[in-house]
Amino acid sequence: MLPRFKVMPPTTLVGHRRCMTLLADSTADLWQDFQRLLRAQGVAPEVARYSVRVYQPVYFEDFDPAVPFEKWASVALGPNEPLLPGTETLVLPGGFYAVFDYRGPATAGSQVFTYIFGTWLPASGYVLDERPHFEVLGERFHRTAPDSEEEIWVPVRPRL
């Protein structure tokens, strides 16, 4: 699986967030609560969802699955759209990303991330940049379906 590279402009998201670890992952609960809010507010199901992780700068230096990070369930906010009640705002700063197109169930995601961080990144000529990581979950995303599709956006910069 090879990425394509994209420059993303700053993007304003609205959503819910939780602090969690890989060992105590509460992603399913976070998304269940947020999806309920979106339905109540009449947000169309085809609106892309963003699953965002905000890591501390040293998170990947000595990787430990017990170290906490912030996880967001969110949608993009248009320039003239009001904030959804009960949500918070997160501004993705934009920048250069390696974008991986993943097809398969979300439950197999750990294998994909192991490949990205353990195989692709060390051989790529890039290093992680200290910006949020995220997945774009579009109309073809269905969490447990074998043909589910999502984009995995990894912030990178050239290795010096």
Image (cartoon, helix red, strand yellow):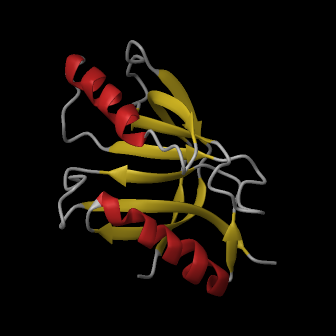
Indicate left or right for 98 with 51 as reference: right
Q: How many marks?
A: 0
Give the residue drawn at x 55%, y 63%. Answer: 97
- Residue 86 percent coordinates (x, y): 42, 14
View extreme (bottom): residue: 123
- Say which of 69 and 9 sits in front: 69
- Residue 109 percent coordinates (x, y): 39, 64
Q: Classify residue 1 by image quadrant.
A: bottom left
- Say which of 23 and 83 sits in front: 23
The C terminus - image quarter: bottom right
Task: Say above or below: 31 vs 151.
Answer: above
- Residue 84 percent coordinates (x, y): 38, 17
Give the residue drawn at x 64%, y 66%. Answer: 156
- Say which of 132 and 110 sits in front: 110
Indicate left or right for 138 with 75 as reference: left
Give the residue drawn at x 18%, y 66%. Answer: 146
- Residue 154 percent coordinates (x, y): 55, 62
Give the residue drawn at x 40%, y 44%. Answer: 50
View extreme (right): residue: 160
Q: Classify residue 101 by image quadrant.
A: bottom left
Task: Say above or below: 56 vs 63.
Answer: above
Task: Say above or below: 124 vs 24.
Answer: below
